[in-house]
Amino acid sequence: MTTTIGYKCVVLSDLHLGMADSKPKRILEFLESIKTDVLILNGDIVDIDALNRGSKWKNKHMKVVIKLLDMSRNTEIIYIRGNHDNDVKDLYSSGLGNIKFMDEYIYIVGDKKYLVFHGDKIDITTKYKLLTQIGSIGYDLALRINTWYNKYREFTGKPYYSISKVIKENFKKALSFINDFEINACDYAKTLNCNGVICGHIHIPAIKEINGIKYYNSGDWVENFSALVLTHDNEWKLIQ
């Protein structure tokens, strides 16, 4: 894919490299299609949890990492840890190539400040490790069923349909009375005097305003294949 599109900033989250159902080829195609001054990797880039559960790290996953290292020679890359790659916090002080690792980041555009963090720290379910592990295994299973189901749909000439996406979105809606993720994210950004907040984690891409704070979610690269970008006109956009 030819590089033709330029941005000030690109935010990607939830690539889940190493998970059996990750899509490294599509990620690589996207990275090769853009130029950006800053690339923010907003958590769950490498799915260490999936690897610990027995998933296999393959050459196609490594190609994405090599591409990121190559990009870092000319592009500022910020890697923010997520709940599935929490172990990258061991690299906070050392880095990898020209990639900087951190817990959260404030990105400034003119007189506006945007808090960038993965989102797990405000998700009540991540405080209960067993519940999180059960959820991760269940989501992996849903993705695997989804893959088999869509192979059948392709064989019968039917369009792609994401079972796992529907399950996840409905599960999050069911928990909304306990943990309204978007409101909590905006409230957290407000405590740090930021004008907006940029998250990942819940795999639901969005741009909206909540209580005077702009909320952005870059989505994921397992199902939505979405990114949050800042144009040279200082406009945030979701692209898929």
Image: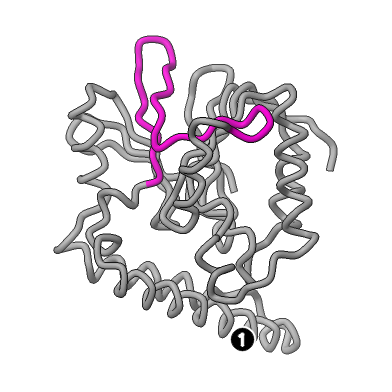
Residue at 31%, 68% (x, y): give it: 129
Relative to 3, residue 53 above or below? below
User: What is the basis of the colouring in this image?
Assistant: one colour
Foreground of the two, 143 or 98: 98
**Callout 1 crowding tier (Cα within 10 Å): few <14, some 14–19, many ≥20:** some
Query: Is residue 106 covered in magenta?
Result: yes
Q: Position of residue 116 (x, y in %)?
A: 40, 34
Asked whether, in this view, residue 236 is left or right of residue 46, the answer is left
Question: Disc 1 marks which amino acid?
Answer: Tyr
- Residue pushed farthest right? 2
Relative to 54, residue 118 above or below? above
Q: How many marks?
A: 1
Q: Position of residue 87 (x, y in %)?
A: 48, 51
Foreground of the two, 126 or 205: 126
Q: Secondary structure at mark 1?
A: helix
Q: Position of residue 130 (x, y in %)?
A: 31, 74
Foreground of the two, 3 or 154: 3
Q: Quadrant of residue 4?
A: top right
Residue at 34%, 34% (x, y): give it: 197
- Residue pushed farthest top? 110
Asked whether, in this view, residue 1 is left or right of residue 240, the answer is right
Residue span colored magenta: 95-118
Identify residue for label 1.
149
Q: Position of residue 196 (x, y in %)?
A: 32, 29
Q: Can you say which quadrant of the picture contains the N terminus? A: top right
Asked whether, in this view, residue 33 is left or right of residue 119, the answer is right
Residue at 56%, 51% (x, y): give it: 45
Q: Quadrant of residue 124?
A: bottom left
Relative to 65, residue 97 above or below? above
